[in-house]
Image (cartoon, helix red, strand yellow):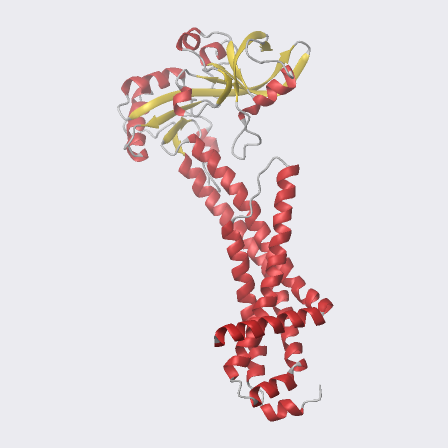
Amino acid sequence: MLFLRLFRESYLFAVRAIAVNKVRTLLSLLGITIGIFSVISVLTVFDSIESNLRKSIESLGSNVLFVQKWPWAMGDTDYPWWKYMKRPETRVQEMEEIQKRSNLSDAVGYYVATNKNIKYKGLTYENAAIVAVSHDYNKVDAVDIDEGRYFTESESQGGRPVGVIGDEVAQKLLENKDPIGQQVVVFGRKVEIIGKFKKVGNNTFGQSNDSWLMVPVNFGRNFLDLNSDNIGSSIMVRGKRNVTNDELRDELTGIMRSVRKLKPMTEDNFAINETSIISKGFDQVFGVIAIVGWIVGGFSLLVGGFGIANIMFVSVKERTVQIGIQKSLGARNSFILQQFLFEAIFLSLLGGILGLLIIYGGTVLVSKLADMDLVLSAKNIIIGLSVSGVIGLVSGLFPAWAASRLDPVEAMRSTF
């Protein structure tokens, strides 16, 4: 009951102080509001970006390895690109050898991409991604088709001029027409559309398939030089269940060295990449960004903390006589201390809540205007409120301690 009475009285004192000194309170809370807004808005934006990145990375599959010419490197300043550029690209024949020899893989696919204009009855979609894939590509990477279908095995093996088109390409070229059965022109060849990808929107990682035209690799070899060492091809290998990436990598290394006839002491002339490399790289990047956000917002929080301390010192001065009367009636030092501490924390939390409300309004606005989902997560709300509470506690501690140490006789004599 004593705690509830203390809570009620402290709450009433805090509300009365805000009501009486609106402008002073608003200016004091401005620093906390701006500080929380700065920190939590940065965390919210980059949490949303990180979430989209991780979803994109996860869509590739944590158990998928990529046999490529270039090794992935995130933030590596010592990257010997001049050595890697001499390496050969991966070939369709090498993919076929992996399919034959691998005992640990569940599916193997090949893809190569280039940019080219797509035409349809006088309309042109510029710089579309023409992606040529092997038949089992859809078993390695998720192919989310909204309308139509994927290639049949006979279409893939025979190199039929068929394709799966992205949503954006379909909208701009075909407008409101049903894309299935339409024929577009690429590289001077007619391609029949047999499927349309589900709309993805702006993909944070890599290129969205909204701008793709996917064709069988045996059709793509008619206009792509698959033996070139500058085409950016890749072999994707998904491991069987309970097979670790290290085990699969060791097997793939042995197969590729055998296929390329590398001598025992010769260095690998290929790279085997996995999505964890990207994840670790982004962990470092977002860690640095979070630190920068806290530093920037920290200055505002510091100013806000001084503002709270200032308003509490003024509040103590204004209520000196009241404190004296309370202590003369038997109020303990701890009662006075808790009373002013509660007021400081309450004021700081109010500033934090205002900052969070501004951020929430901003996330709703940005999500509607831009093609990006921003979400103020429960974690960031808790962080914002916790930081506000701590700032209030620290800022109000000394003024509250000073109030609790006042001599009741001297306090009642105050004429302020």
Which residue is depicted at the point 58% across and 55% down? 39
Is 19 on the left or on the right of 268, as rendered?
Answer: right
Number of numbered markers: 0
Which residue is depicted at the point 36% across and 32% down? 63
Q: Nearer the viewer, residue 178 or 258?
A: 178
Q: Nearer the viewer, residue 214 or 24?
A: 24
Q: Provide residue 221's location: percent of width, then percent of height.
A: 48, 11
Q: Provide residue 394's location: percent of width, then percent of height.
A: 54, 71
Q: Is residue 356 visible?
A: yes
- The image shows residue 269, relative to residue 156, as above or below, that is below
Q: Is residue 231 visible?
A: no
Give the quadrant of residue 48: top right
Toward the right, the furthest residue is: 23
Which residue is depicted at the point 43% across and 43% down? 280
Give the quadrant of residue 15: bottom right
- The image shows residue 338, relative to residue 305, as above or below, that is below
Is 237 on the left or on the right of 220, as rendered?
Answer: left
Q: Quadrant of the C terminus?
A: bottom right
Q: Provide residue 104's location: percent of width, then percent of height.
A: 28, 26
Q: Provide residue 60's location: percent of width, then percent of height.
A: 43, 30
- The image shows residue 19, relative to residue 95, as above or below, that is below
Is 355 on the left or on the right of 105, as rendered?
Answer: right
Q: Nearer the viewer, residue 230 or 134?
A: 134
